[in-house]
Image (cartoon, helix red, strand yellow):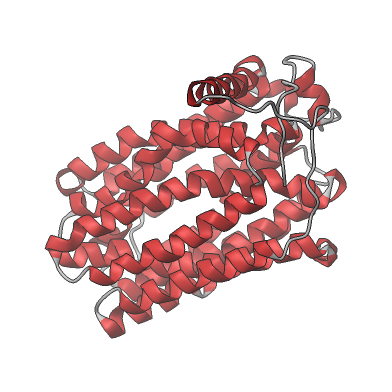
Amino acid sequence: MLSVLRQRNFALLWFGQLISNIGDWVIKIALPYYTYQLTGSVLATGSIFLASVLPGVFLGSVAGVFVDRWSRKWTMIGMDLVRTLLFMTLLAVHSASDIWIIYTVSVLDSVCGLFFSPAKSAIIPSLVGEQHLIAANSLNGIGDNLPRLVGPLLGGVLLNLSGNLTSVTCVDSITFLFSGLMIFLITAPSTFLADRTRPIQTSIGGALIKVWQEWIDGLHVVKTQQFILILFIVIGITGIADSPLTVLLSPFVEHNLHSNAVGMSWILVGQGIGGLLGAWLVAQLSKRVPLVLLMLVSLLATGLTALIIANVPVLPVSIACITFVGICVMQWAVSFEMLLQQHTADAYRGRVFGTFGNIASLLSLGVLILVSATGDYIGTIPWLTISGLLYLLTTAIGAVKLRDFLFKKSDHSPESLVSSQSPIPTSETKNV
């Protein structure tokens, strides 16, 4: 698995994201906890997550159109530079009256992510090739989870020491700048579709019509390929299931586990350890176990463990369970991403991943609003129980709808799967 890091371009992307993710976890632990300290309100804390979800509801699939039109390398660099400056504005947050700045940053950061994340997912197959895709995605999972061992603890300690967002903000901004530099050093050549030319648009109206057509083309791929559509539904429901814990983790730690920001950090570190183990396991198991089966078994285990977390609110138990959940989540998340990459032509990957983000955001939005509005009244335990039950529901749906794929390994190239059902517009060009 580690041999794929010998490929310079992927190694640059991976290392840049490793450092950037440390900064992300520093700020992720600090923002909700600091907001809850300033306001004492579940609604105010949950609104951070609502603010981060809203852009995906309206722009997710549209952003994917531009990811497929623009250079994916420069798209990621641009988003990193914007976020470097964006998070520095958090230095102005000192009281509850400044919370609007946190909400604004959360919205704009989410917009940047709508371009960065699909570009990253879409560029990986171009950097490593089909034969190294499993190893690359597994390493990607390790890169996402290794920072959890450092970032949450660092964020919790910095927040406790400073009592404000100054130090965590500076750390996160520097890591975005580093990520942009690493991506800048990637020297992968541009790759093209059959027709390498793009007709020059003579008017803004013509350009908008072209963007509209390409957006419709992307939705057509999702609509006409039943396998991709079912994957969207199954994994989209996990966004609903994750919403209660996302909003209620800070109150759960403080009121049910009787701990503080450091205890919350240890929970996230446990999840990171589980994620690392899960990333290694998925690289091993995916060679022997069909990806659909691996995904569904992991979803089932996630749901059962979530019910234990909800009904046994003891800090050591929660840390152990979250660690195991980290293993399971990495198994189904990497399996899903590999299935989507394998069953989508390169020309459409940006739009397909963008559309998934759109659907996941839409599904989770209502739950985030509901949990934020009722969390103070219903309480954390009932909502976390519902979360576990939703995981069991999505497992059942997947087992029924994907039963023909449970024990079948993919034997089709992405290009053939897409081109057989929807022609690739010859006017498109995709750049790395």
Residue shown at the point (53%, 19%) measured from the top left: 209
- Total marks placed: 0
Asked whether 208 or 171 is in front, the reply is: 208
Residue 304 vs 227, above or below: the answer is below
Residue 334 vs 178, above or below: the answer is above
Q: Quadrant of residue 428?
A: top right
Picture coordinates of residue 177, whole percent (x, y): 53, 69
Picture coordinates of residue 321, whole percent (x, y): 48, 59
Instruction: Give the left or right position of residue 146, taking residue 23 as reference.
Output: right
Residue 29 vs 200, above or below: the answer is below
User: Can I make out residue 140 in this image?
Assistant: yes
The quarter of the image holding the N terminus is bottom right
Residue shown at the point (51%, 66%) measured from the top left: 176
Asked whether 272 or 43 is in front, the reply is: 43
Residue shown at the point (65%, 18%) measured from the top left: 226
Q: Residue furthest left?
A: 97
Q: Quadrant of residue 400?
A: top right
Instruction: Give the left or right position of residue 425, taking residue 325 as reference.
Output: right
Instruction: Give the left or right position of residue 86, taking residue 136 as reference.
Output: left
Residue shown at the point (26%, 42%) measured from the top left: 371
User: Can I make out residue 257 in this image?
Assistant: no
Instruction: Give the left or right position of residue 63, taking residue 156 as reference.
Output: right
Picture coordinates of residue 295, whole percent (x, y): 65, 39
Asked whether 124 or 319 is in front, the reply is: 124
Q: In which quarter of the image is residue 96?
A: bottom left
Residue 350 vs 213, above or below: the answer is below
Q: Which residue lies furthest to the bottom in this view?
A: 161
